[in-house]
Image (cartoon, helix red, strand yellow):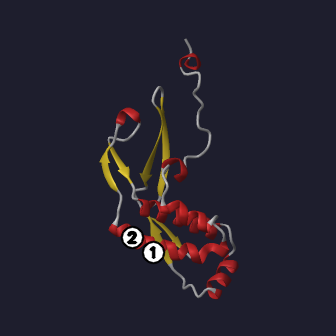
C-alpha cells in the first residue's frame, strides 16, 4: 500500500511558512501590519516608530521556552514568542528589506527629509516552520534565531 493510499487527502505545503500560518487568531500584530501594508520606503518612518515602541514592550513581554509536544513535531523545549516579539521581528525584517532594495542616495535623502539620524537597530528574528503529522494535521512552530539581527542605516 502506498502513502497516497494511506493519506489520499494529503497535500504538501509548497509555500514558505509565515506569521499568518503561525498566528491564526486575531491579533493587534495583524492590525499594525495591515496599516503598514508592505515594506516600502514611504512607510519606513511609520515602521520605525512601531519598531521602537514595541521593542520596549518586548522587554516587558518576552517570549518563553516551554515544554513542546514532540509527538506533533514540536521541539522538546519549544520557544513560544510573545505577540510583541513577533511584531518586532516582522517590522525588523521589513526595515531590512527596504534598506536592501534602495540606493544609498535614496536612503540618505529620505533620512534627511524625515530627520532620521544614522542608526543601528537590532532584534531577534523569528522564523516559522511546519510539521505535517499524518492523521493529526499540520502544525506550525516559531523559532528564534540565537543571535540578534543587526541593521545599520
What label sits on residue 53 in the rendered view? 1
> On the picture, is 37 further left or further right than 19?
right
Image coordinates of residue 80 in percent, x first then y, are 37, 52
For the C terminus, the image quarter is bottom right
In the image, what residue occupies the spot 58% across and 65% down? 94
Q: From where the camera sits, is residue 117 visible? A: yes
Real-space Cα separation, disc 2 to disc 1, in angstroms: 7 Å
For the N terminus, the image quarter is top right
30 shown above or below 119: above
5 shown above or below 59: above
What label sits on residue 121 in the rendered view? none
In the image, what residue occupies the spot 59% across and 88% down? 115
Mark 1 element type = helix
In the image, what residue occupies the spot 49% across and 63% down? 28
Front-most of 2 and 20? 20
Residue 117 occupies which quadrant of the picture?
bottom right
Mark 2 element type = helix
Q: Which residue is mark 2?
A: 57
Image coordinates of residue 49 in percent, x first then y, are 52, 77
Front-most of 135 and 117? 135
> On the picture, is 108 further left or further right than 32?
right
Q: From where the camera sits, is residue 93 visible? A: no
> On the picture, is 87 further left or further right than 38?
left
Image coordinates of residue 125 in percent, x first then y, are 47, 59
Q: State yes or no: discs 2 and 1 in contact (Cβ < 8 Å).
A: yes
> On the picture, is 58 further left or further right than 2?
left
Amino acid at each position: 500500500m502506498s502513502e497516497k493510499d494511506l493519506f489520499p487527502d494529503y497535500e504538501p505545503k509548497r509555500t514558505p511558512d509565515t506569521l499568518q500560518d503561525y498566528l491564526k487568531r486575531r491579533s493587534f500584530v495583524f492590525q499594525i501590519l495591515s496599516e503598514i501594508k508592505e515594506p516600502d520606503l514611504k512607510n519606513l518612518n511609520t515602521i520605525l516608530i512601531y519598531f521602537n515602541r514595541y521593542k520596549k514592550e518586548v522587554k516587558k513581554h518576552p517570549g518563553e521556552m516551554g515544554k513542546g509536544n514532540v509527538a506533533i513535531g514540536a521541539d522538546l523545549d519549544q520557544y513560544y514568542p510573545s505577540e510583541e516579539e513577533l511584531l518586532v521581528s516582522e517590522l525588523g525584517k521589513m526595515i531590512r528589506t527596504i534598506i536592501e532594495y534602495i540606493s544609498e542616495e535614496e536612503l540618505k535623502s529620505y533620512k534627511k527629509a524625515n530627520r532620521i539620524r544614522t542608526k543601528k537597530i537590532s532584534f531577534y528574528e523569528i522564523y516559522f516552520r511546519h510539521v505535517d503529522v499524518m492523521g493529526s494535521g499540520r502544525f506550525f512552530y516559531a523559532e528564534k534565531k540565537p543571535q540578534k539581527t543587526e541593521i545599520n542605516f
